[in-house]
Amino acid sequence: MRKRGRMQLDEQYAIRLSRLIEPAVLYLLGTGAAAHGYDLLSEVNAMGLTETQVDPGAVYRVLRQLEGEGAVASTWDTSGGGPARRNYELTELGRARLASWVTVIARRAEAMQEFAKHAQELLDKG
């Protein structure tokens, strides 16, 4: 029973971490590591920000949202074989949004490190 509760907690944690898709996508577009949705999905998964594979639909929803807000721009890539694909790139607004994410994540990382330190001290006391 305890293990079941642990699994549910892990799953909830993974779902919450999926919110990191947006800054990951912005970062990857900024580095030029990926420009197509499928490539972005692969790279986001490779970053290891979640314990589970990121849902492809989540990446595409984030891309559509970011494009609608002007943080990314897309063009159709018709080169090569196969169907046309959207090629995404970061805009100046997207770069500013990534900078905001960096600030938020850095603050959150500090707070989480402090929490982990204190929680471990509590657990070590027995």
Image (cartoon, rainbow, N blue to C red):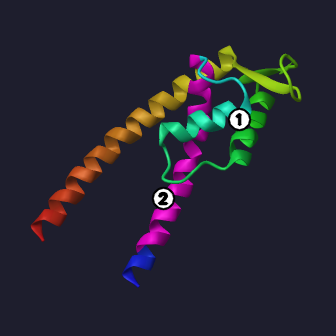
Q: Visible in this render: residue 97? A: no
> Dot 1 corresponds to which residue?
38
Question: As displayed, is residue 61 above or below residue 37?
Answer: below
Image quadrant in which the C terminus is located? bottom left
8 in the magenta segment: yes
Q: Which residue is denoted by mark 2 in the rendering?
A: 13
- Would you say 39 lies left or right of 28 here? right
Left or right? Give the position of 102 relative to 110. Answer: right
Q: Amino acid at mark 2?
A: Tyr
Q: Secondary structure at mark 1?
A: helix
Q: Residues within 10 Å of mark 1 (few under 14, many from 20)?
A: some
Residue 7 appears in the figure: yes
Q: Residue at x 56, y 25 (%)?
A: 27
How far across and how far down the image is residue 123, in percent? 18, 65
Give the mark nearer the N terminus: 2 vs 1. Answer: 2
The residue positioned farthest toward the front in the image shown: 81
